[in-house]
Image: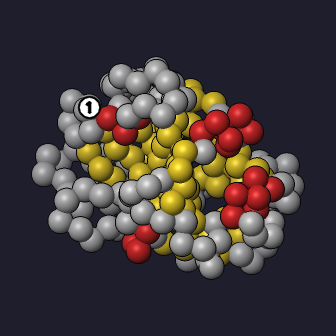
Amino acid sequence: MLKIPYNKDLILPAAPLGEMGIYPWDKTGYTPKATITMVYNEEFLRVRLQSPVTELTVLTHRDNGPVWEDNCLELFLAPYADHPDYINFECNPIGAMVIGKGAGRGERISLVSLLKPLMNVTATVYAGKGYEINYTVPLNALAEIYDRPLLQKGDVLRMNAYICGEATPIMHFGMLFPIDTPTPDFHRPEFFGEAVLD
């Protein structure tokens, strides 16, 4: 089980939480390894996703567009163990996002207009060094969305994190926790791993 550290000031730890380096569907040998770093306090869950990809594809310039066709970093998060719904946070290198909630791929409810304005999303491209996405998820917003108490120390989240690009020069699908399906499908919560608020 991964451990998400507590920090009152939401200062991210030096070491990432994990690496998106598992490529079960790869046939090309192109396997860029992104990282996810997380920290929390009483109010927020802070997330940083970092990609080493330097030649970027950006076709989507608006929220709720097909950001997964671009170079994309994603966090799928099921914050409450007793609720089947998870939230997918998908973001391209310019900060265009898809945020949805549901129990599977079908019938997802968009949360972009509700959550994104509260998340302080920043997308930064580093010339020749890749890019990163940073945001903070308000815990009170998650509590309202799920009608559950605020997350706190000891709670276990279910999650996976991904790097992908369906319309990039070389299509790729990397992940933090392995997915055992014959074809690419990130919307498989049965393969989520666990992370505890430490």
Whether residue 125 sits left or right of residue 172 in the image: it is right
> Among all residues in the image, which is located at the extreme front?
107
Q: Is residue 54 visible?
A: yes
Which of the two residues, 72 or 9, is positioned nearer the viewer here?
72
Point out residue 74 in the picture as x, y percentages from the top left corner.
47, 47
Residue at x 76% of width, y 53% of height: 141
Which quadrant, please, contains the N terminus? bottom right
- Towards the viewer: 129 or 121: 121
164 vs 49, left or right, is left
Badge 1 marks a residue whose secondary structure is: loop
Q: Residue at x 22, y 40 (%)?
A: 171
Q: Quadrant of residue 144?
A: bottom right
Q: Where residue 100 appears, x then y in whole percent?
A: 53, 49
Quarter of the view holding residue 25: bottom left
Task: Tell me which amino acid carries mark 1.
Answer: Thr
Q: Residue at x 64, y 55 (%)?
A: 38
| Residue 197 vertical placement versus 38 (above, below) | below
Q: Residue furthest left?
A: 27
Q: Which residue is mark 1?
A: 168
| Quadrant in which the C terminus is drawn | bottom right
Q: Does any portion of residue 131 appear in the rendered image?
A: no
Q: Is residue 31 above or below residue 184?
A: above
Depth check, front residue: 19 or 115: 115
Residue 70 in the image: x percent, y percent?
35, 32
Q: How many marks?
A: 1
Neighbourhood count class around disc 1 (C-alpha, 10 Å): few under 14, some 14–19, many 20 upward: some
Residue 50 % position (x, y): 51, 41
Residue 7 drawn above or below residue 194: above
